[in-house]
Amino acid sequence: MLARHDDPIAAIATAPGRGAVGIVRVSGATVAPVIQAICGRALQPREATYLAFLAADGSIIDKGLALHFPAPHSYTGEDVLELQAHGGPVVLQLLLARCLEAGAGLGMRVAAPGEFTQRAFLNDKIDLAQAEAIADLIDVSTEAAARSASRSLSGEFSREVHAMRDALIHLRMLVEATLDFPDEEIDFLQQADAQGQLDRLRLSLTTVTARARQGALLREGIRVVIAGQPNAGKSSLLNALAGAELAIVTPVPGTTRDAVSQTIQIEGVPLHVIDTAGLRDSQDHVERIGIERAWGQIENADAVLFLHDLTRTSAPDYAAADAKIARALAQRVTATVPVIDVWNKVDALGPDMASTADATPGVRLSAKTGLGLGALRHELLQAAGWQAAPEGVYLARERHVQALRRVAEHLTLAGEHLSSRVPALDLLAEELRLAQNALSEITGEFSADDLLGVIFSSFCIGK
């Protein structure tokens, strides 16, 4: 957990390395002494000023732009100074050291990772979901994810959550009023349509949860493991999906000894595709290690592509080995993880075999020619639970989805208490309170300190 939130802080805000421009950022209750020491004069608020950055002895460290954002109209809600200099590492380190020197009397220190954004959160400039969206916008790997992160940062997700929270508070108020006045002739809950309010709240929650799930997919992606016997074409399929020669492909069984992975995009959704060693009984010590690692990847997968070689399915030994793998998959993969049968090498089939293969459930393709890859991509998106991305999707994290699930559970129990023959109002009030707390965890209005520490420590320094 980050500490001493009243200390002035400074950090280099641009990425490590050389660049045309680099930025040093300072934030605190006041940065006036630092401005005077480095710039030699006061600065007009929110106005870029070109000047020399001065060392303690009056010599020039560099020349660049200085901007002063007085509190509370700044990123952190505090006084903020940004120095835009040439982007050489030595220059930026000199400027940072000079800021710390000039602010020593104020107790200035180097910022911890994410501390600027944490102060923005603590000073009510943004909520927790927006803070996470800032980190996500920096880290996203697809255009669709970037657009969704931008929507979260603008507050669309938070507004949905706040609207549900306000509805919950209103419903709680009705329940508490009924508890406070049990002998009143007026039935507060029935008159105020408490059941209708709860139903509308659950409907809103369903919509928000669906969007959040889509956003979590855009952010996290899914782990897709390609499994099957040796020489089924697993490495060829990875190469075909990635559009690059990533894995070695040879006619020799057991070529792949370790996992080879690549992240691809399908409709903006990141898929982390992993090629594994062929599954078979082997006396080769190294190959056995690779096979055991393959099973480890399979057990941690979000989806499994079980690859079959259509040119060998009629061979009894091959069919028996496939059946053995299928039984092992059923035992070692949880029921919630989809296992997709993929039938490879359709390009090598004769007319008779092709008609038989068409009747086989699953996806038929040729990793060599690319035939059927579109169908496989569509199947993977369906397995992930992805729908055509609506404009309203906002980037969300798994913790948001889990919080929304807890809200749904509490509202379900609240509905049961409300609709019982003798409404259990005490239990109803408690479930509504717990639902509100779960919602507030998303925006940070109700959060444990250790959660905040984990979230902000994952940011880069200077952000």
Image: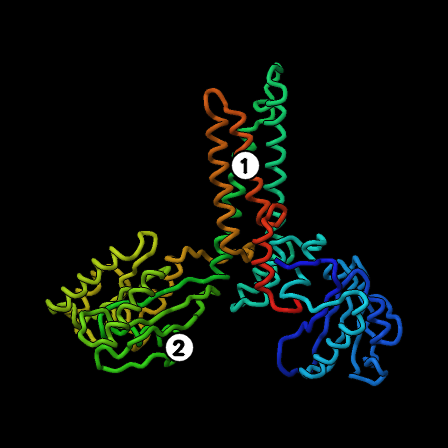
Q: Residue furthest right?
A: 41
Kindly report the distance in space between the C-alpha atoms of the residues bearing marks 2 and 1: 47 Å
Above-or-below relation of 249 to 415: below
Q: Quadrant of the N terminus?
A: bottom right
Residue 379, visible in the rendered structure: no
- Secondary-structure class at tag 2: loop
Above-or-below relation of 154 to 370: above
Rendered image: mark on residue 249: none
Residue 152 horizontal/vertical position (percent) = 60, 56
Above-or-below relation of 129 to 164: below
Left or right side of 124 for 316:
left
Left or right side of 129 for 290:
left
Pointer 1 residue: 200
Residue 335 horizontal/vertical position (percent) = 31, 52
The one nearer the camera, 456 or 268, is: 456
Q: Residue at x 61, y 27 (%)?
A: 176
- Secondary-structure class at tag 1: helix
Residue 143: which quarter of the image? bottom right
Pointer 2 residue: 243
Q: Residue furthest bottom?
A: 59
Left or right side of 393 for 290:
left
